[in-house]
Amino acid sequence: MSEQQIISGELLIFEGDPFTDAPEQAVQIKSDSALLIEGGLITQIGSRDEMVAAHPQAIHHAHKNKLICPGFVDAHVHYPQTAMIASWGKRLIDWLNTYTFPEEMRFADPDYAREISVRYLDLTAAHGTTSMASFCTIHTASVEALFSEAQNRGQRVVAGKTCMDRNAPDGLRDTAQSAHDDSKALLERWHGVGRLSYAITPRFSPTSTPEQLEAMGTLWAEHPTCLMQTHLSEQVDEIAWVHELYPKAQDYLDTYESFGLLGERGVYGHAIHLEPREIDQLNEHGAALVHCPTSNAFIGSGLFQMAALKARGLSIGLATDTGGGSSFSMLRTMAAAYEIAQLAGSVLHAGQLLWLATQGSAKALHLSDKIGALEGGMEADITVLDLASTPAIAQRYDNAAHAWDRVFPTIMMGDDRAIADVWIGGARVTPTA
Ligand code: GUN
Ligand code: ZN
């Protein structure tokens, strides 16, 4: 029998969807509870005392003043941008040309790709992120490096080769044919291997010719279990450029749709400045959007319309968008989502924020049968939050009037010091903090 571990304390449990049901019904904090980990899975959830009595031989990790959560799921990142995060002073297109593309060029070197993969997965684990969907670079070595390192760690990772065949510098362009062939070879090698899965990844319409988007659409049709991830309607200038490059397209989404790149397993980052037709089509196809709030503030993109899009029933994940986003932390990202919602005229409940960072992202990535909730049968990816991790947060925690009031200050002010413990696939990862 494999080793058993019990984690006990306050558990974050999802009983429903906090955007359709009352948040405090849908997301519950259960005291004196415990979960049992065996063979990389959560096999039971229940009362602490009963669990400990039933499994006296299990290793017991007891937590006080903590919240035991599903591991955070970051639904849109660029791991190759780790080393240029927080680069100053540019909006999207200039930012890509000035900072991003020169850094991505370095991933032609497999050793550099390996070094940054290790650094990125160390940093994110220290911030409580246990899974992510990452763009890589045009280089197959960048995909190999991230998948290999994730495999070493037993980590659930979605990734894909970023395809672009125009409007990028020499050395950072593929072709329609090579993008198709390289992506196909990579997905045949990695998709569904252990906890890894492949996402077909055209960067965005401005850096792909129509021929490349068509090739990506063909590949997706041949491999429909893969996700397809890209960017959509992030900045107003970008949208104007898309109209110039694709004069026949009705709108930005149509540049994807007309090449077979709109579907249920499509995951569209940013999606800030959407036309009514685009929202209708995304909804009809059951596609997912990913909100990247620190990025949207940092690059000056605009205010994501969470309340209106959720009211339409769209699937929405939450993401850092490292390194357009200014943080590796999903706590900081939840705080930014709260702030952007405030600016857009609505209020997000702490339970909704935690749900977005776990279950919402897992659903957007079609992984919610495996990760994103503390339930029997789910993979044991767990993040334990210290709810009194700094003096400033502790004094709020001590004076809190009710359970959610003890959690919200950590969402707004917490950083990697709030990450008390992390498990990935049932293995304890000691945070570096
Ligand atoms: N649009 C196309 N590529 C990128 C990228 O790397 N980051 C962001 N934020 N937007 C993009
Ligand atoms: Zn992005």
Image: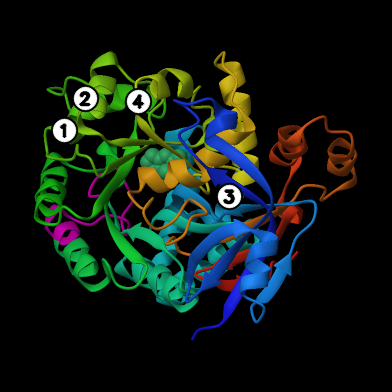
Cα separation, mark 4 vs mark 1, equals 20 Å
* Nearest-to-viewer mark from 4 and 1: 4
Q: Nearer the viewer, residue 183 or 76?
A: 76
Q: Nearer the viewer, residue 294 or 72?
A: 72
Dot 3, crowdedness within 10 Å: few (<14), some or many (≥20)? Answer: some
Q: Earlier in the sequence, mark 2 or mark 4?
A: 2
**Residue 396 sits in which quadrant?**
top right
User: Is 178 inside the magenta-drawn segment?
Assistant: yes
Residues under numbered marks 2 and 4 in contact, where contact means CB atoms less than 8 Å apart: no
Residue stretch rendered in magenta on the structure: 164-180
Residues under numbered marks 2 and 1 in contact, where contact means CB atoms less than 8 Å apart: yes
Residue 355: percent from left, percent from top: 52, 40
> Mark 3 is on which residue type?
Ile
Cα separation, mark 3 vs mark 2, equals 33 Å
* Nearest-to-viewer mark from 2 and 4: 4
Q: Residue at x 39, y 22 (%)?
A: 309
Q: Earlier in the sequence, mark 1 or mark 3?
A: 3
Residue identifier under label 2: 281
